[in-house]
Image (cartoon, rainbow, N blue to C red):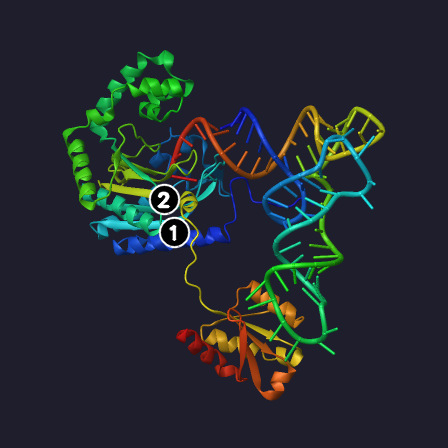
Amino acid sequence: MEKIRTLRGFRDILGEDIEKFKRIESASRRYLDLLGFTEIEIPVLESTDLFARSIGDTTDIVEKEMFTFTDLGGDSVTLRPEATAGVVRAYLQSGLHAKERISKLFTIGPMFRHERPQKGRFREFHQVDVEVFGTDDPFIDAELLWMISLLLGDLGIKRYTMEVNSVGCKLCREEFRAVLVSYFETRQDRLCEDCLRRLHRNPLRIFDCKNRQCIEVSSESPLLFDYLCAGCSGHFQGFLAHMNDFGVPVTVNKRLVRGLDYYTKTVFEITSDELGAQKAFTAGGRYDNLVEEMGGPKTPAIGFAIGMERLALLAGNEEGPRKPVCFFAYLGEKAKAYLPLMAKDFIGQGMSLRYSYEGKSLKSQMRYADGLGADFVLILGDEEIERKVIIVRNMKEKDQFELPLDPPGLAAVLKERFRKE
RNA sequence: GUGGGUGUAGCGCAAUGGUUAGAGCGUCAGGCUGUGGACCUGGAGGUUGGGGGUUCGAAACCCCUCACCCACCCCA
């Protein structure tokens, strides 16, 4: 019979991987909590309309990368390809916009995109997603990047680049769009097929193209950055000044654009050259119009997402402080009868106790204990039961001693010994 | 969706077209009765991803297919 495997692009997370994920998660939670963010859990499955409307129905994500299907009730539903849309929906649905002036929210969980997998890219991947609603002050833009820099420092990640740019507001973008289209129209013969398609639908995306000719053409094109209105330009300068105040270096990349339609003003991407082709492991930006477009009141907002798989590729393995592990090795049925007593005693004291289920030879149990990395092995056989003692072997020191056989109290004695060490 | 690479034991790998596909790590059991790591001995574990073809003979060569990896596309 054929073995059943995970679907393409899906994977199990275990062993060292799950340890890294836990470290990323707890470090993220630590800084988010310090800066006043609260957690929100949102559904993995939402109505397809939610994503089509928020992300933009001409984006690649919506056009060809969503896990969309019709449910048994005949509705079109989609596994979330990103979190912002759902968080905005929840923000409005729960009435948070009316309850608090500023909302700082985060959510951690899986996202789904039907793409071809490669290094750092999976069909199911995990993000730490952070959103702030209710202010367009550039200080919050800077605060977010500062927080990310703290998190990365905490995880021991040093080699990365924070690229920032401003994509302006609706006004400057409209004006620039006309300039850009006419620039590329006179050079259509040098653009690739994809870019010709982008030309009228979403000309900004031509900057994203990696085709050599397109890069040449776009490298000489006018830049949105130079067409920012006074408001957007001032906002960006304020943001840069705050970054400077925080002492977090950023690189202005005037060609940086984003693949989702809702972004305005500040956008950023954090990259590492250790990641292969998918080098951005965190990205985000401001979206001052999205809440309103989703049917809410005019509410400026900004957010970002950390790709946990990609961040895990950068974070080294690190062993945290380990709690002592005891192992109970028993010989014979009489000794095995002590197993429940021992287990209750140790677990009741908050001490880890391991043991084999089959018993087997003492050698076998010792090997097992060693493989588990036990610090102490408690050995009990008929001889010890008769003498009312138990052998305690220190695996690191390779020596052993005896303690009175007294299960409801043994764990406390050993716990005290660990404390002294 | 398009390229390229790789599929052999649980894992990472070896095997000019030629006996019964191997060693290492891991696993299990022993090494004078009840003491771990090192060492020694032994055991278990394979449809060589699957299907077809060429051949006296295929893990190897050809075709198809599947899976994984990397890249394009796109993105966290």
Q: Quadrant of the N terminus of chain A?
A: top right
Badge 1 amino acid:
Ile
Q: Is residue A372 left or right of residue B65?
A: left
Residue A397 at what x, y percent from top left?
51, 71
Tell me the distance, in whole angstroms, between the alpha carbons under discs 2 and 1.
10 Å
In the displayed orientation, state which residue is furthest to the bottom: A387
Q: Above or below — where is A274 with respect to B30?
A: above
Q: Say which residue appears at 64% left-offset and 68% top-offset.
A: A364
* Secondary structure found at label 1: helix
User: Dot 1 surroundings within 10 Å: few (below 14), some, or many (20 or more)?
Assistant: many
Does residue A116 show up?
Answer: no
Query: Which amino acid does the dot numbered 2 rest on?
Result: Ile
Q: Check residue A24 in the rendering and tell me which mark sits there, or answer none.
A: 1
Parent chain of label 2: A
The answer to whether residue A320 of the structure is visible from this angle is yes
Which quadrant of the view contains residue A33?
Answer: bottom left
Please name whichever residue, A1 or A334, is drawn nearer the observer in this view of the structure: A334
Q: What label does residue A67 carry, if any?
A: none
The x and y percentages for residue A352 are 49, 70
Q: How many marks?
A: 2
The answer to whether marks 2 and 1 mark residues whose Cβ atoms lie closer than 8 Å is yes
Residue A306 numbered tag: 2
Q: Position of residue B69 (x, y in %)?
A: 52, 37
Q: Nearer the viewer, residue A2 or A72?
A: A2
Q: Of label 2 and label 1, which has the lower sequence position?
A: 1
What is the quadrant of the C terminus of chain A in the image? Answer: bottom left
Q: Chain of mark 1?
A: A
